Image (tube, helix red, strand yellow):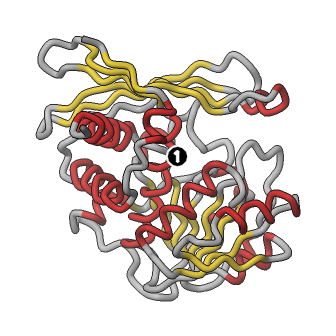
Amino acid sequence: MLRFVSAEEISGAALPLRPLYDLVLEGFTLCGRGEAECPPKAGIHTRPGAFTHAMPAYLPTKDLAGTKIISVYPGNDAIGVPSTNGVIVMTDAETGIPSAVLDAAWITSVRTAMVSMVDTAYLANPEPVFGIIGATGVTGRAHLKAIGAVYPGSRVLVGSRSPQRLEALIADFASADVTLITTGSDEEMVRGSDVVIVCTSHLPEPILRPEWLHPGHNVLNVHSRGWPGDVLSSVDLVSCDDRRPITHPVSGLLGCYPGLDPDLELGHVVVGAHAGRQSPEQIVFSFNYGLAVFDILLADHVLRSLESRP
């Protein structure tokens, strides 16, 4: 029977976060070994700045298959509905018959944050101070939870143009295993952090400046359009999860970053095929565009976890 798993059922399960890091790390290992079929996203664009992507993946060694269908419509915020919506359809690898449909919101935000944690583990300097641009949003909050789970006790610089949203964030994370430090500007946050995570999306113009970067920085462009195109001339190493989607001439990032040509894919660093960061002074700039491999692994984990509960 086709099973439907709602957002409420997933969030209500309160699954521990640390095992999800291990699943995302496993996903990078499979990609680095070439043991994943994960074609570039296919998309449609029914409104300016909005899109719906189809993201299939197949993991032969685990015999897992599925497709995430995800939409991002920034205009939804103005009418009081979520801007990001989607489902993950798990498929029987033997017959192609759909076996489960899961709400994609929680899985997407958690796997995105855990990708950043893997990036930090393999490309950042040890014991970093984190900074999150857009910490009060859904993606920023997911990163705070991930940092607490994977790097407990870390200092995290946060800020917001809305004092109310910032106060709510500090209250919500008062008992979390992170130390929040408020900053007065994006510049102060970038300059004061070792790992800066850009979670501000739907920007009409860049808000960050290359001159704020410093030796040893690890920049995680979760939402990639915060920097001007010439920032790449100020960095030493460009990383990505998969070079194909970000260098696609239509749907990729070449329009924002002309000449973008990543030096490495993170999966190759994870399996030891690439050295990654080669000195503490290097500035590493990462574009992790999102791979369905992680969605499928986490969806399978959610299903198994729910099935094992009494």
212 relative to 95 in the view: left or right: right
Q: In the rendering, at what x and y percent does residue 176 appear?
A: 56, 70
Q: How many labels does the image show?
A: 1
Q: Residue at x 34, y 42 (%)?
A: 298
- For residue 79, above or below residue 294: above
Q: In the rendering, at what x and y percent does residue 103 appear?
A: 47, 28
Viewer-proximal residue among 139 and 34: 139
* Crowd tier of the residue under label 1, counting other residues whose Cα lies within 10 Å: few below 14, some 14–19, many 20 or above: some
Classify residue 196 by image quadrant.
Answer: bottom right
Q: Which residue is drawn at 44% across and 65% down?
A: 117
At mark 1, the secondary structure is helix
Q: Residue at x 40, y 26 (%)?
A: 5
211 relative to 277 in the view: left or right: right
- Residue type of the residue flagged with mark 1: Ser
Viewer-proximal residue among 30 and 40: 30
Q: In the rendering, at what x and y percent does residue 165 appear?
A: 81, 57
Q: Quadrant of the C terminus?
A: top left
Q: In the rendering, at what x and y percent does residue 60 appear?
A: 14, 35
- For residue 53, above or below residue 293: above
